Amino acid sequence: MRITIAKIGADQRDSDDVALQKMILVSVVLTSAVAAAVWGLVYMAAGARIAGAVPAAYCVLSLVDTILFGMIRCYAFYRFTQLMLILLLPCLMMICLRGFQNSSAVILWSTLCPLGALVVHDLRAARLWFLLFLILLASSALLPPPGNSTDLPSTLVAFFFVLNIGCVVSVVFSMMYYFVKTKNMLQIRSEMLLSNIMPVEISNILKGEYRTIADQYDDATILFADLVQFTPMAQSMSPMELVELLDEVFMCFDVLVEKYQLEKIKTIGDCYMVVAGVPRQRADHAHALVRMALEMQACVAEREFCGRLLTFRIGMNSGPVVAGIIGRKKFIYDLWGDAVNIASRMESQGQSKAIQITHATYKLIKDDFVCESRGTISVKGSGSMEIWHVLGERSGRPVMLVT
């Protein structure tokens, strides 16, 4: 049934929004036409034949209008005629029944005209239809005082009062319910998206205001991991295969980031960047990130990714950093400082399957991890630096808790 309705007036050039608007309008019109036919029969059976002819006329006009819409596919004309019928016919029916009270407040149905325009048209059109409704409502107050010879039973008048008010309120409630539900779903989706690209603490700030965010962190540890022999491997793979491989391995790393409550900063090609101690400060930032590095190497060594064995170089350094967001478009949460640059050099000048760390990181973890001195290397911009390779965690020592 839904597919059949969606085909009425459908056009391949329609956007998703327009296609949805068409389906909603056609569904409402066909449902209202059936209800109007029943409405008209009830009034005619009660002796109010002229009043009963109004909803009956709406039923016929709407069906003809819908058939024409299916043939010529002129949505603007179909939308205009339907909104006009919804606006005028309840008022005409009120006149036939001699007043607001005798008609059981049937003019309330006209409120669905501007409300419907919000759904099937746009805000500007809805404002215009709402203004027309107010003019129509004010004009109805100028009608001469109603007579008492409607010949409708008081019980029927009361019944239609309940029906008119109940149905209109139900439609309004349904629209508001759908709007609030959709708004909440979109808000949750946007918050999840925002939290996936930056820390929750930062996303909460951005939801309130757009400004440059830059904070100093004196104690942090940064990790860079890079896939060894990535360039020749990429040349032997299709773009889709390459993306699938990186996605598979980085998803494993993402799980470890969550496990150790760290902060993934970004991926640059085949490079994976993580920080500990930012933006949530913690005393064991170096320990947590080294544990993750060991699990990263173990994860890569234990399995194949898209049928391939991979190896990574990992470099780490500890020190002060500045973290934040700059710019206005396509912004990301990033890190700056010498500590970041040195961590990157530790990775690029490291060895395959090794976790290479600086003296700054070694001082923080040496009592809890087995490390091997690898002498000194020349680091661009920093001169000669001592380096170590992390071999594993010392057995029998307790795991430090996050603070």
Image (cartoon, grey):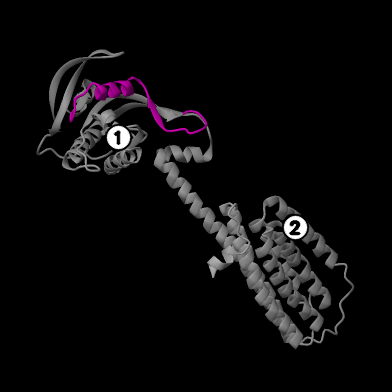
Q: Which residues are magenta?
A: 326-354
Which mark is drawn over residue 282? 1
388 vs 208, nearest the viewer: 388
Q: Amino acid at mark 1?
A: Arg
Quadrant position of residue 29:
bottom right
Marks counted in the figure total: 2
Mark 2 crowdedness (10 Å alpha carbons): few <14, some 14-19, many ≥20? many
169 vs 311, nearest the viewer: 311
Which mark is drawn over residue 395? none
Residue 104 seen in the current view: no
Quarter holding the N terminus is bottom right
**Which label sits in the foreground, 1 or 2?**
2
Horizontal side, residue 279 vs residue 56: left or right = left
Quadrant position of residue 378:
top left
Q: Is residue 246 magenta?
A: no
Give above or below for 31 relative to 330.
below
Q: Is residue 330 magenta?
A: yes
- Name which residue lies at 79% across and 87% down: 47
229 vs 389, nearest the viewer: 229
* Dot 1 or dot 2, earlier in sequence: 2
Quadrant position of residue 270:
top left
The residue identified by callout 2 is 129
Q: Position of residue 152 (x, y in %)?
A: 78, 86
Q: Amino acid at mark 2?
A: Trp
- The Cα–Cα distance between marks 1 and 2, rounded to whole angstroms, is 59 Å
Q: Position of residue 149 (x, y in %)?
A: 85, 85
Q: Residue furthest left?
A: 396
Q: Position of residue 244 (x, y in %)?
A: 32, 42
